[in-house]
Image: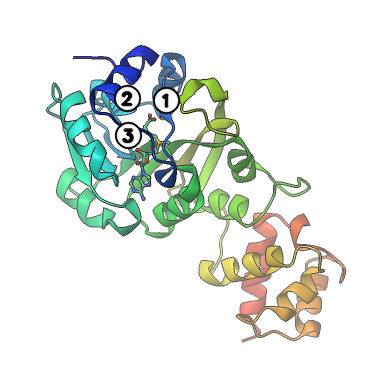
Amino acid sequence: MTTLVQPHSTFDVLKKYHFSARKKYGQNFLIDAHVLDKIMEAAQIAPEDCVIEIGPGIGTMTQGLCERAGKVIAIEIDDALIPILKDTLSSYNNVTVVHADVMKTDLHQLIEEENQGKPVKVVANLPYYITTPIIMSLFESGIPLKSITVMVQKEVADRMQEGPGSKDYGALSLAVQYYAKPEIVANVPLNCFVPRPKVGSAVIRLTAYEKPPVDAKDPAHMFRLIRASFNQRRKTLVNGLFNASELHYEKEQIAGVLKEMGLGEDVRGETLTLDQYATLSNRLLTLN
Ligand code: SAM
């Protein structure tokens, strides 16, 4: 069996199958063994783990996962990669390749069937065109999760990890930090992939919380406030929330709650912590 992570073996497989990477599926294949090891280490894959890999490509990370995990479920959208995966993963009997779009896959059912509904780890070198929707839908779907360890654009990894005061702080930071503890574990240069992406990458581990770190009585309401305040970054929080079509509060009500929280009328949404958003949300709900 070929160990794919060496650049020459990746080139050999691509040549053997006359395969050229497709931009529309965000295909940049990993060719660096050191980075692969970092991802495996960060995800702390152990024999009792069931791992879902999103976008196995030609199977490079999948091989590493099969070596370490009890079970691997690899979900790949591209028809042309399915016969390649059959070949490159032929020596493993602990992998199931699912030919599907992860955004249209019932992960609850898959986890029920493959892991008796027990928590899984997600590991992936994510397609960059769809990184945020994939991560948000993993969290919002409420599937049983231990952690998500993913390669993403460096800038997106920064956004997930930042807090108030940073230009990268936004709705994604707050959403991720509500569900998980984010830690960037490695920065990955362009030459670790073929073809080379245009921007740098990073590996980030999101360790799922058993219980969210803040007590939002109605998380969906809190996220409506967060989206509204970051949709209108240049406005004050009072104006941002007042103008949002999905919210129905008067300016005086919002300003009143902010005052109770010790915040001024001209405060901006980007200065509030997750805890403050939870408090704001809970107090506004009592006005309904
Ligand atoms: N894991 C491989 C590696 O590290 O070399 C490939 C990573 S490549 C950045 C992203 C992979 O995700 C590609 O194989 C691509 O075809 C697949 N992909 C893109 N969109 C997808 C989707 N919606 N559902 C499942 N797989 C997808």
Q: Nearer the viewer, residue 125 or 167?
A: 125
Instruction: Identify the residue shown where x is 81% and y is 77%.
Output: 255
CA separation, marks 1 and 3?
9 Å
Is 18 on the left or on the right of 6, as rendered? left
- Secondary structure under badge 3? loop
Q: Is the C-beta separation of discs 1 and 3 under 8 Å?
A: yes
Percent x, y for residue 75? 27, 43
Q: Quadrant of ligand 1?
A: top left
- Label 1 lies in ligand 1 vicinity (Cβ under 8 Å): yes
Please state which amino acid type lies under the numbered disc 1: Leu
Instruction: Identify the residue shown where x is 70% and y is 84%.
Output: 249
Q: Residues within 10 Å of mark 3 (few under 14, many from 20)?
A: many
Q: Is 130 drawn above or below residue 186 in the view shown?
A: below
- Secondary structure under badge 1? strand
Please state which amino acid type lies under the numbered disc 2: Thr
Q: Name the residue tied to disc 1.
A: 30
